[in-house]
Image (spheres, helix red, strand yellow):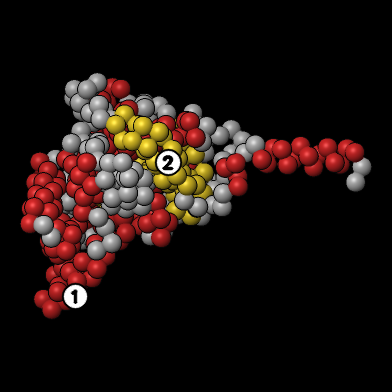
Amino acid sequence: MNPSSRIAVALTLLLFLAAPQLLHAEGELRLADLGDFRLESGQVIQECRLGYRTFGTLNRERSNAILFPTWFAGTSKDLVDLGFIGPSKLADTSRYFVVAVDAFGDGVSSSPSNSKKQPGRTFPEFSVRDMVKAQHRLLTKYLGLDRLHAVIGISMGGMQAFQWVLSYSGFAQKAVSIVGTPRAASSDLILFDAGLRGIDTLNAIGDGEALGPEASAALLALAALTPEFYLKNFSRSDLTRALDGAQEIILKYNLTDWAWQLKAMIGHDIYRRPVASEKEAAGAIRTKLLVIVSRNDILVNPEPSLALAASLKAETLVLHGECGHFSAVCEPDKINAAAAAFLNRRN
């Protein structure tokens, strides 16, 4: 090998070693150490960590990044396993560099279930705004991004998308909220509070982790789908089997993690300091918005999302299927088509 070739190889190796993010396989779980992270309440998450995965390729202009936060109790792995991330998927990795981030309380990022210094109910309560603040720090300090092409979120992820467009207005060029809300409606609060009270009661009994899945499975099944869906797809005898299946899934979750995320959703309201109304918020938002809701959503009422979309003259897609809050799973073709048209448009 001649001297010039050796120099070229050495420079290539140095550049490779200087970019440690390239050493990770696509989709590999990574944990960003945020240190002691101060929440808006003034409390601190000690030794705070944020889980994330990256997919696709960041372009030369560093302008094609999409953030995809998780839904209630969901993880970044769930986003992949359920088919939301990948080529020609909702988050299209053939066009975009996708950063999937685990929200506080999902058992991957800092949570009551995995904190060594603040375990269980000693873990400080956090807000949706705190989730977004941590994600902003991840993007700017760890990934060196000073802008996003878009934020995409489903359910609690959609709540985070709404918070993003106000907390960091203009940081993302676009945002897509799917069955999310800018603030919990009164009907949402009743359901969230019922779930939280159920967890508190079961924990007070002393056998919460054993009994919790039964009550949680029934509540989730009731609110996540519509009565019409059950009438068409389940006989009376099928319901017991369905609830047993839901319980088996829920058994893998930690109920204190659930409680803390429920509290975050109960307190979610983008119309609070520094803004005080929907009108003020609409005037402060500089991000283009696509709002996707289900008219039959029992779990997250679509009206607050549609009202903000009207104020912003934002694009909307209203679904009318029988899956209600689970429309993202039942009607992916409609959602993907609308999101692709919105995200790929140059303006």
Image location (x, y in percent) of residue 165: 34, 31
Mark 1: give few (<14), some (14-19) or many (20+) Cα within 10 Å. few
N-terminal of the pair, mark 1 or mark 2, is 2
**Is residue 169 depicted above or below 201 in this figure?**
above
Q: Identify which amino acid the numbered label 1 is placed on.
A: Arg
Image location (x, y in percent) of residue 39: 28, 30
Mark 2: give few (<14), some (14-19) or many (20+) Cα within 10 Å. many
Q: Identify which amino acid the numbered label 2 is placed on.
A: Leu
Q: On the image, numbered disc 2 is attached to which residue? A: 67
Residue 89 falls in image quadrant: bottom left
- Residue at the far front: name it: 117
Q: How far is disc 1 from disc 2 in space, using C-alphas?
A: 37 Å
Q: Nearer the viewer, residue 159 or 129?
A: 129
Picture residue at 90% right of the left edge, 46% below the top:
1
Q: On the image, numbered disc 1 is attached to which residue? A: 241
* Residue 139 visible in the current orientation: yes
Q: Nearer the viewer, residue 228 or 28?
A: 28
Picture residue at 23% right of the left edge, 47% below the top:
120
Residue 239 falls in image quadrant: bottom left
Picture residue at 47% right of the left edge, 30% below the top:
140
Picture residue at 14% right of the left edge, 58% below the top:
208
Q: Dot 2: what SS?
A: strand
Image location (x, y in percent) of residue 45: 31, 35
* Residue 338 visible in the current orientation: no
Image location (x, y in percent) of residue 227: 13, 63
Residue 185 falls in image quadrant: top left
**Is residue 40 depicted above or below 178 in this figure?**
above
Q: Dot 1: what SS?
A: helix
